[in-house]
Image: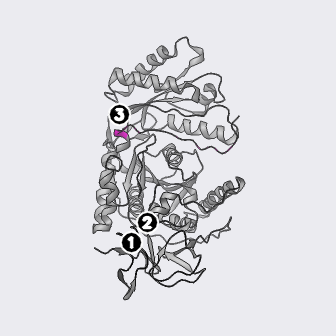
Amino acid sequence: MSKFIKINPADNVIVAIDAISAGEKLSVDNTVFTVLDDVSAGHKIALQDFAANDNIIKYGSPIGHAREAIKQGALVNEKNIKTNLDGVLEYSYVPQEVPALGANENLTFKGYRRKNGDVGIRNEIWIIPTVGCVNGIINELANELKSETGCKGVDAIVAYPHNYGCSQLGDDHENTRKILRDMVLHPNVGAVLIVGLGCENNQPDAFKEMLGDYDTDRVKFLVTQKVDDEHEEGMKILRELYDLASDDKRVDVPLSELKVGLKCGGSDGFSGITANPLLGVFSDFLVAQGGTTVLTEVPEMFGAETILMGRSENKDVFDKTVHLINDFKEYFIQNKQPIYENPSPGNKAGGISTLEEKSLGCTQKSGTSKVKDVLMYGDRLKTKGLNLLSAPGNDLVASTALASTGCHIVLFTTGRGTPFGTFVPTMKISTNSNLYNHKQNWIDFNAGTLLEGESMEDLGKRFAQYIIDVANGEQVNNEKKNYREIAIFKTGVTL
């Protein structure tokens, strides 16, 4: 097996698959040279001499320019490369041809068909607070119901505490209401108890109106200031909800009903070579079946946004994508923060040096299909196919936002590893086998086998079947460990 990979014929750097020591001889494109530095797996090596300001090419595109002269064989990292990106840009609509998708295989999974026609892949009971003041109460209620029932007949009983619902203004207040609304209406939940205090900004009666037409048998409210014993009243309601939800059964459902969120975090130099392209292959597969995928992390589109814009279904979607990108840049500017300083310490340690490099790897999760729609934060899905969603790169905030669109699963690629999960199954896909072998209690699927000779075709088939198995009820690690949380995007003042 080779110790390095050249991703694109136009690249002027290679990526080390294994650690390479200074002094080793490498042969690339019939040129032999000496490696000048010790290079860790996932990091870049210069294939040529660079003068200051020369572009460095990876994935066939510039990922920045040399800060200074770089010798052939030298390590290329954040110390000697700088981003080319700067400021808000203007864009032109230049539609690009996209490859034809594969055949619809008429596949199915076993899901829960809800009263309104929606489909869930889990049948859980959730207790959701309108305000953080009642977090202790909802945790107590969830624990007692689990103790009473053993969760027999349902997939989980979960309380979802959060810190918001009061002392918020403007967009922050609406963001909280939207995410909580989306959770209540999510098809993975068989029954919901919404617990309020009574004096909060997120008033239970107003929130009830925001839900619109909902299943009043499966969604109940408890306002704790209006009852003598909130625990007794809450358990009475929960027992009734449990009796209903525990009778629900899985039925055959077309794979076209599946909705999947695409996310990455703790990325490394292999993210754009293994796990993210695997998600892209799956996204194209699911879209070909009539299903839906959602790509988010807008700051991690910066530098690769024109690829997505060129795949817009039409001019209207292009215009929405331009606003998605530039509005998020303005968010950084308004808060007096640099737009392009995104790679984290972990990213840099794993071999990612600039935001362009990160974005060109990240956007591969979207595959090659057309972008059908663009969602604002808190919006719910209405268009099948590939969608873009406005949300930050933060792992839990973005994953919560993906689940809130109606996604049944979040696929989360990582080169460094993370245990967390949001309120839908949050599947971890490792970029390398070392991580998978050391963290099997975190990682659900290994894409590192692509570096060891497995073909993308074979890996893609295994991956698609595993996702169908999870849709059928197989638990992923965050569910087994009960790592389930939510995080809501906040931008403004707290009173």
Whether residue 240 is situated above or below residue 170 in the rendered picture: above
| Alpha-carbon span between mark 2 and mark 1 | 9 Å
Residue at position x 36%, y 82% in the image: 26
Q: Residues within 10 Å of mark 1 (few under 14, many from 20)?
A: many
Q: Which mark is residue 16?
A: 1
Residue 86 shows in this picture: yes
Give the amino acid type for the residue marked by disc 3 in the picture. Answer: Asp
Give the residues drawn in magenta, as a range. Answer: 479-492
Whether residue 400 is situated above or below residue 279 in the rendered picture: above
Q: Earlier in the sequence, mark 3 or mark 2?
A: 3
| Alpha-carbon span between mark 1 and mark 3 | 43 Å
98 relative to 168 in the view: left or right: left
Q: Secondary structure at mark 3?
A: loop
Contact between marks 2 and 1 (CB within 8 A): the answer is yes
89 relative to 26 in the view: left or right: right
Q: Main secondary structure of the magenta part?
A: loop
| Alpha-carbon span between mark 3 and mark 2 | 37 Å
Comparing 111 with 394, the one in front is 394
Give the amino acid type for the residue marked by disc 1 in the picture. Answer: Ala
Q: Which mark is residue 407?
A: none
